[in-house]
Image (cartoon, rainbow, N blue to C red):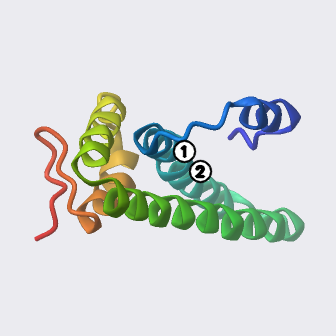
Amino acid sequence: LTLGGAAEAERHLAAPLDPDLTAFARRTIVEACIDESLGVLELGALLEDASDQHERALLRLLLREEIGHAELGWQTLEWALRAGGPAVADAARAAFAAAAATESSAWREVIAPCLAMLDISIGGLECAAS
């Protein structure tokens, strides 16, 4: 589990601001939707295995924060899809398709259901809302 740190924060702060909504959506997908959602899974697994009460308390706190970050990422993507129209939707599909190339059980358990809520289909993956 990588919880970031100073180097990670510097990388994010040094990234240039891009007024292009498609670029913003792509970064949101990778950094917030996918990374934060998978971080929720990792922290949840660590919490299940933790036996020390202090460690469990810290993991619960981190898990709540990670859930908030993931939710914000998905809400931001939803806004970008509404605001950006077909161009942003196409960029989102491409970004998720690239990430799906490394499909895992985590993808099927977390990312695909979130895509379904946004009614985004990616290649052969069944992600569209029913």
**Looking at the image, residue 30 lies above or below residue 102:** below
130 left or right of 122 in image: left
The image quarter containing residue 77 is bottom left
123 left or right of 70 in image: left
Q: Nearer the viewer, residue 27 or 50?
A: 27
- Type of amino acid under label 2: Gly
Q: Nearer the viewer, residue 119 or 126?
A: 119
Label 1 crowd (10 A; few <14 / some 14-19 / many >=20): some
Q: Are the residues flagged by discs 2 and 1 in contact, CB closer than 8 Å?
A: yes
28 left or right of 54 in image: left
- Type of amino acid under label 1: Asp
Q: Nearer the viewer, residue 102 or 48?
A: 102
Q: Report the residue at 32% width, 43% height from top.
A: 92
Q: Report the residue at 62% width, 68% height from top.
A: 68
Q: Which residue is mark 2?
A: 39
**Looking at the image, residue 27 lies above or below residue 127:** above
The image quarter containing residue 102 is top left
Label 2 crowd (10 A; few <14 / some 14-19 / many >=20): many
User: For the C terminus, which image quadrant?
Assistant: bottom left
Image location of residue 40, percent across then percent down: 57, 58
Q: Which residue is mark 1?
A: 35
